[in-house]
Amino acid sequence: MVLIENCPPGPLLFVINVINIICVAINLPNWRNFLPWGLGDAEKNGLLSHPLPGSISESMPKMPSYVDFLAEHSYVRSFSSYYQFAFKTPSTSLGVLTTPDAMVVLLVLVLILREIKRFVLPKFSAVGRHLANISHGSEWVKSNELKVTKFGEYLYRLLFHSSVSISGIYYFCDKPWWDPARGGAANMFIDFPNQPIEVDMTWYYLIQGAYNIDAMMHLLELSFVATWRKPIAESGRIQTPLNIKWSPTCRGDFQEMAIHHIITNILVICSSHMRL
């Protein structure tokens, strides 16, 4: 194992890693032996001789999957056994969003959220339309239908984030890592990366992850239009079968929102994968 204190600076490790990836790809794993001026000589502490530390994810303990849970408890596949696995058992594969079990649940949650939105957004927009009729008049509503629609979307986001925040405070306020007097956030890293993943935290991540994925999908749906076309155009020119264009409904802040959603999803997924 490579100790952190013995590692060279991060940028140098990055350069070594890039060189190593290229050389391994061309079947030259011992590339350090061919470097001049002792750059790859470990005994002389050559600049490029430092071994690469193992991936952080390699040190993460494997979380038991649903199949492992069934085998351990001699259960059969059923709604009851999955309920025990998902809602009563801490430290399962559902607590790591990059596992197959968690991905399946994320997919189901995304579909559920989309159905909820399909049902409630028109009703929320109707509320906005009613309020706008009272405050601005019917003519204003007819010429600002997009703003009325956005009102429904913003109301949905407000209710979702408020509900998740209140639920998070309710479930986590009695945890030692919540209370500074009991050690605060340092408690979350006791026995890292083998600390338990509680059921409440598992579902908090799953629901937030599903919401962020759905938000990214919604942004793409608003921003692009995809149509199928013949691989060979009438002029005889070869073209891609899938034609993607900007949508008339594309947001003016698409670039900013795309960066926001990408970074948010990376943070949530990596945080779950790395037990942070």
Image: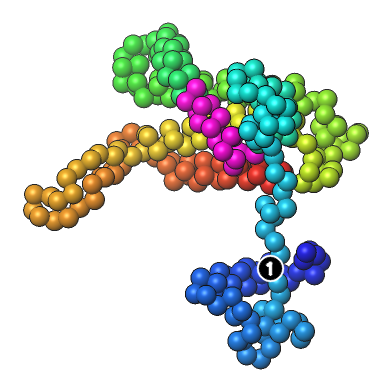
Which of 142/90 is in front?
A: 90
Reading the image, the residue beneath label 1 is 52
Q: Quadrant of residue 144?
A: top left
Q: Residue at x 53, y 26 (%)?
A: 109
For the record, the magenta segment spans 96-112
248 shown above or below 136: below
Instruction: Tell me residue 161's x, y (percent).
Output: 60, 25
Q: Quadrant of residue 183?
A: top right
Q: Residue at x 24, y 50 (%)?
A: 240
Q: Residue at x 45, y 20 (%)?
A: 115
Can see residue 110?
Answer: yes
Hey, what amino acid is under mark 1? Leu
Which of 251/276 is in front?
A: 276
Instruction: Tell me residue 38's x, y (percent).
Output: 69, 88
Q: Is residue 94 magenta?
A: no
Q: Is 201 left, or right, of 246 in this rendering? A: right
39 shown above or below 206: below
Q: Quadrant of residue 30?
A: bottom right
What secondary structure prevails in the magenta region? Answer: helix
Crowdedness of circle 1 by 10 Å Cα count: few (<14), some, many (20+)?
A: some
Q: Is residue 98 magenta?
A: yes
Instruction: Tell me residue 24's x, y (percent).
Output: 55, 72
Q: Residue at x 44, y 12 (%)?
A: 123
Q: Is 137 left, or right, of 159 in this rendering? A: left
Which of 42/271 is in front?
A: 42
Which residue is farthest front? 74
Can see residue 152?
Answer: no
